[in-house]
Structures are given as structure tokens and as C-alpha cells.
Amino acid sequence: MTAGPRAMLFDLDGTLVDSAHGIAWAVNQTLGELGHPSADDALVRTWIGEGARFLLHRALRHVGADLPDGDAFDRVLALLMRHYAASLPRQARAYPGVDDALRGLRARGVAVALCTNKPERFIDPLLDALGWRALFDGIVGGDTLPECKPSALPLLHLARAFDAPVEACVMVGDSHTDAAAARAAGMPLVLVDYGYHREFDLHGAGAVAVTGDLRSLLQLPAPGGVAHAMTTGAA
């Protein structure tokens, strides 16, 4: 990398926070109200990352429930969202080193943004629980724009907001959804080797780096140019 990125766009669930325990609690509260058995946390973890509707579809398929559609599905989704809101304190589990990485990037003049498929109304309460409200220069949730990841739209929207070319920004995530969005936007990609990547081939996704500790991002040169290469691993 000849010069560091001007902006870093971070996925949330599985990249910055290990929210699976809280999300699984919300899913199981919903299933219980519908008269179905609970799903293991480890299984629910494999359903995270593609939005609430996908999460609910997978949960209902798992228990063999008839999949409602239209208004009926929306009523069940509203039930899930009620429990999801109550689960936010349980979701507030930052991965090691994330707080240091976010604060360190901002101190170096790098714009820091959230680019997540989590519904927008749940983001601020989670950031408040983590003490992160002031750490982000831009936030795009799953329902902020007409399209969410894997569409390129959220990434391009944030790049425009920062008045930065896409090649001077980096998408940081943990899943094929993040990788597909970065590829569609033509934006450099960094992947973490933890999170909710399921069977996704992290090392075959064309990322400029796969890292186990976001503090490694602090090794990047000062902002100003195109991402070409990066040192992997922990800082």
C-alpha cells in the first residue's frame, strides 16, 4: 500500500461485535412464542449477516414451520424485531482490539463508518451500550437506502459522503455479503478471520488482507491513496 485509505467502512455483526448470543436469544424468544423449540446459538450464528428477513426465514425453515408471506410474514417479523430490540444489551460484545482500532484510525485522520445490514433503528442503542456513538463519521444500516449489501449502493453512498474515490476507501467485513458488496463497488476489501463467515473462502475472496485483529489496520500508512497491499495479522 503506497498510501493509506481515507475511509474505512466496517461491517458490524461478526466484524466489530460478537452479537450472535443476543441475536440467538431474540430468535429463540420468537420461536418460543410461536410454539416452536429453540435453536442452538451455534446454528443461529450461521444465519447472521444477510438481514432480519433472511434470519427469520432460516429460523422458520429449521423448525419446519409453514413459511408465511405478505402481511402474515410481516407480523412474525415484527415479533422478532421486538425481541431483537430487547436483545441489544446482550449483543454489545466487542471483539478484542476493536475499540483501540477504531479510536486509533480516527486519531490518524481516517474517516470511520459503519456499513451494516442491521436495521437502522437498532444501531444507536447498540453503539450507546458500547460507548461508541461518537466514533463513526457515517452510518448506513440495512434499511437506510433502497438496497443493502451485497449491493454496492451502501459502499458507494459512504464514499460519496466522504468525497473519496472508492479506491481510497476500504470495506472491512467477515462474510461473502461484505466481499460481494466490495467487489460490486470496486472497493478494496479486508476480511477478518473470525465472525460469521460460515463456509466462505476468506483467502479466495480477493481481499487485500485477512486479519485476526483489527489493530493491524493501524499499521497502514497515513491516509491519501489507493489500497494495494497490507500487512496481515495482529498489531
Image: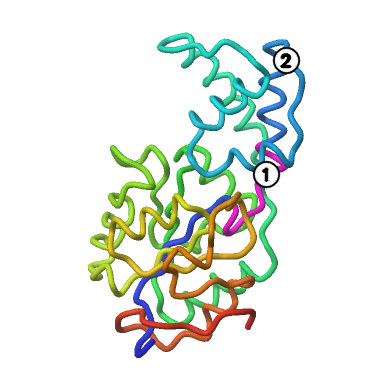
On the image, the x and y values in percent for residue 25 come to 72, 33
Q: Is residue 16 magenta?
A: yes
User: Which residue is located at x 32 percent, y 47 percent?
Assistant: 151
* Disc with the residue nearer the chain's start (1 vs 2): 1
Q: Residues within 10 Å of mark 2 (few under 14, many from 20)?
A: some
- Residue under the image location 57 percent in, 43 percent down: 125
The C terminus lies in which quarter of the figure? bottom right
* Disc 2 target residue: 36
Q: Quadrant of residue 40?
A: top right
Measure the C-alpha gap from mark 1 to mark 2.
Answer: 20 Å
Q: Residue at x 44, y 75 (%)?
A: 208
Amino acid at circle 2: His
126 lies left or right of 32: left
Mark 1 secondary-structure assignment: helix
Q: Position of residue 116 (x, y in %)?
A: 46, 49
Choose top left, top right, bottom left or bottom right for residue 31: top right
Magenta-highlighted residues: 14-23
Residue 30, image x and y in percent?
Answer: 66, 21
CB under 8 Å between callouts 1 and 2?
Answer: no
Say above or below: 228 vs 169. Answer: below
Image side of residue 22 versus residue 52, left or right: right
User: Majority secondary structure of the magenta segment?
Assistant: loop
Quadrant in which residue 37 is drawn: top right
Residue 8 image position (x, y, % from top left): 42, 68
Residues 168 and 194: in front is: 194
Task: Give the residue pinned by disc 1.
Answer: 20
